[in-house]
Image: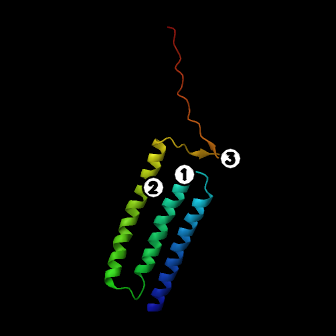
C-alpha cells in the first residue's frame, strides 16, 4: 500500500511541477501584462494544489505536517485568484490597456456614439 501511495504522490508532485513550469513559460512568452497574469494566476493555483496534495499523500508524513499542508491547500485557492483580480483591476484603472492582435497593437477604445440632432 505504501508503494502505491508513493507512486500517486510522485505523479501528483510531477504534475504540479509541470503546471508551474507551463506557467513560467507563459510568463516569458505572452505579450502583455494581462495575459501574463492569466498564465500565472491559473497555473500557480493548479500547480501548487497538485504539489500540496502530492506532499499530503507522502506515506512518511506526520499528522502535524499534513494539517499545515491542508491549511495551505485551503488558503491558496482563495487568495491567488483574488490577488490576480486586484492586480488586473489596478492596472486597468491605472490606464494600462490590453494588447490585441498578432502584432500586439493596442486596442483603441471606441468613441461614444454621436447623438443626432432631431429637427422636429
Name the residue: 38% across, 70% down: 73
Counting from the top left corner in percent of width and height, residue 68 is at 34, 76
Helix, strand or loop at mark 3: loop
Q: Nearer the viewer, residue 116 or 64?
A: 64
Q: Which residue is mark 3?
A: 103
Q: Residue furthest front?
A: 94
Q: Nearer the viewer, residue 120 or 55?
A: 55
Per the rendering, the mark at residue 33 is: 1
Q: Against 79, is 111 above or below?
A: above
* Mark with earlier residue (1, 2): 1
* Mark with earlier residue (2, 3): 2
Cα–Cα gap, marks 1 and 2: 11 Å
Left or right: residue 110 compared with residue 90: right
Q: Against 50, is 36 above or below?
A: above
Marks 3 and 1: CB-CB under 8 Å?
Answer: no
For residue 72, say whether it is visible: yes
Q: Residues within 10 Å of mark 1 (few under 14, many from 20)?
A: some
Helix, strand or loop at mark 1: helix
Amino acid at each position: 500500500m505504501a508503494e502505491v501511495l508513493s507512486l500517486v504522490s510522485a505523479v501528483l508532485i510531477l504534475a504540479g511541477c509541470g503546471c508551474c513550469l507551463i506557467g513560467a513559460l507563459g510568463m516569458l512568452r505572452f505579450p502583455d501584462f494581462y495575459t501574463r497574469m492569466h498564465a500565472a494566476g491559473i497555473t500557480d493555483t493548479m500547480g501548487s494544489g497538485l504539489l500540496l496534495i502530492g506532499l499530503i499523500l507522502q506515506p512518511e508524513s506526520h499528522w502535524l505536517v499534513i494539517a499545515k499542508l491542508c491549511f495551505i491547500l485551503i488558503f491558496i485557492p482563495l487568495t491567488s485568484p483574488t490577488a490576480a483580480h486586484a492586480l488586473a483591476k489596478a492596472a486597468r484603472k491605472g490606464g494600462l490597456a490590453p494588447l490585441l492582435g498578432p502584432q500586439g497593437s493596442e486596442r483603441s477604445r471606441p468613441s461614444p456614439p454621436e447623438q443626432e440632432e432631431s429637427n422636429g
